[in-house]
Each structure stands twice: as structure tokens, then as C-alpha cells.
Amino acid sequence: MTRTTVTVSGYYGFGNTGDEAIALAITRELRKYSAEPLLLSNTPAETARTYGCLSAERMKPAAVLGALLRSRVLLSGGGGLLQDKTSARTLTYYLAIIRLAKLMGRRVVVFNQSVGPLSEQGGRRVARALRGVTVIVRDQGSL
């Protein structure tokens, strides 16, 4: 049986304990369903060793494209990725990954995220990017 590869986009490989705990939980859950996790990471070699999974450099377009080519699903999450309070660049990055996956015909799932805080423009950008996407939020305010 061929295992489905799932690319996971989040704030991984930066040493943030909360985000690394999310990565651990996601990789464990995906394996329970016989899926092969492929995490986009700031430190892909370390991420691969830590979680025993595939990993790719999150800021190298060719690596991201290669990860999505290997995958049938993009899982974006968890945490507070879809916000533009700290920087509009953060939102631009995560929405670009989602848009690329959609353009490539991959299934996209936004998983266990809070959405916001968002500027008015950021809210419109998120709404456009998530049209037709399965979204599972982690709090009532994001709903």
C-alpha cells in the first residue's frame, strides 16, 4: 500500500516549544492514519531527525514546490499563522503556500489555527485564499 504524503506548513524549526509540540502531535496523528508527514521547516535536517519524518526548507521555493509535488495534501497548522498583527509578511508567506497548493490541485486543510488578528485588507486576503478550503479553527473568535 502506498502511503499518502502530507506536507505540513507551520512555524517549525525555530525552537519554539509550542510550535514544536504541535509538529510532534501532527506527525504522530498522521502516522496513525498511515500518512507520511513532510514538514516545511527552518531547519529541515534537524526536523527530520527529531520527528523521524521527511522535511524541506520552508523558505526555498524549489524545496516547497518539491514537497508539494510529492504530496496529495497540504495541512496548514496549527497555531496563529493567519494573522498580520506581527507582520504582513507572515500572512503573505502562509497564504502563498496555500495558494500554491491549490493551484497544484492539492487538497488543502487549515488545521487547528486561530485566525487573526487581521487588518481589513488581511481579512479580505484570507477570505479569498481560503475559499473552498476545509478550515478547522481552535477558538470561537476565529470561527
Image: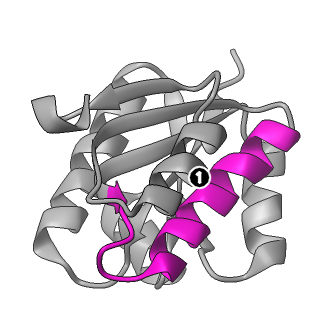
Which quarter of the rendering shows the N terminus? top right
> Is residue 40 rendered to the left or right of residue 51?
right
Bounds of the magenta segment? 81-103
Q: Tell me where residue 65 sits by quadrant.
A: bottom right
Q: Which of 45 and 26 is in front in this view?
A: 26
Residue at figure coordinates x 73%, y 66% from the top left: 64
- In the image, is residue 139 above or below residue 132? below
Q: Which of 65 and 120 is in front in this view?
A: 120
The three-letter code of the residue at mark 1 reads Arg
Residue at figure coordinates x 26%, y 59% from the top left: 117
- Residue 130: percent from left, percent from top: 58, 35
- Residue 10: percent from left, percent from top: 42, 61
- Residue 121: percent from left, percent from top: 52, 60
> Is residue 124 rendered to the left or right of residue 102?
left
Residue 55 visible in the snapshot:
no
- The residue identified by callout 1 is 125
101 falls in the magenta region? yes
- In the image, is residue 57 above or below residue 64? below
140 falls in the magenta region? no
- Residue 141: percent from left, percent from top: 15, 36
Residue 131 visible in the snapshot:
yes
